[in-house]
Image: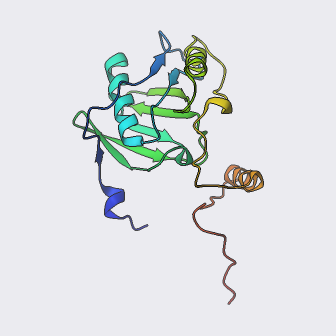
Amino acid sequence: MVRSAKDRMTWVCTGEPPVARLRLADSPSSRSMLDGGWWPTSREPVVELCSLVTALTARRGGVIERIMLQPDAWDRHPGRIGVGGAVVRVGWFTSLAAELVILTGPRDLRVDLAVVAPGATHAVATATMLAASRPADSTRATGETSIPSHPRQGRSARADDDVAGWETEGGHVQRDRPPTAPART
């Protein structure tokens, strides 16, 4: 696979990132499905992820090395971001729900956060983040509060079902290109 220079570059937030709107469980539990909730202010991943990594590092300690996100939920898709002098790798997975972000680091560090859509009301965002940060929370984030798919991508529900089925069967569909028939020999 040939990668462009843009794909290989490390994106750095040049301004002061906003304070992350984040609510974490008081003590992480191995029985929890979620470790808290996060309410980004925009769909700009460089600014929002810098803010999130900075807040998590300050609150939980440890180093965040990787972040996993759903690509349809964000405006750009950087492969690496620079935060506080460190480089964090960002992975984009179509199989991951838009309402979930997973951050990992050394020594089995893993933080799963429910993501609230940037345009959600304060009441909805607060309720979602409170529910996600409850000890031993066994709920998943709901689609009502997730970041919606990118508006430029108007796919039908049937197309999404086909892709979801294909993804769970081990295949991979590139959504940017229409399917082509195999070449006949």
Between 84 and 170, which is closer to the camera in this rendering? 84
Q: Quadrant of residue 106?
A: top left
Residue at 57% over, 14% down: 130
Q: Position of residue 11 (x, y in %)?
A: 30, 47
Residue 53, image x and y in percent? 36, 30
Picture layout, residue 152 above or below residue 21: below
Would you say 104 lies left or right of 171 here? left
**Residue lying at the far bottom of the rendered structure:** 185
Q: In the displayed structure, would residue 86 be above or below residue 9?
A: above
State the residue at coordinates (33%, 20%).
Answer: 61
**Percent position (x, y) of residue 114?**
56, 27
The quadrant where residue 172 appears: bottom right
From the viewer's perspective, is residue 146 above or below residue 125?
below
Residue 33 picture quarter: top right
Residue under the point 54% across and 15% down:
133
In this rendering, does residue 106 appear at all?
no
- Residue in the picture at 37% in, 43% down: 89
Q: Quadrant of the C terminus?
A: bottom right
Q: Provide residue 56's location: percent of width, then percent of height.
A: 37, 23
Asked if residue 34 lies left or right of residue 87, the reply is right
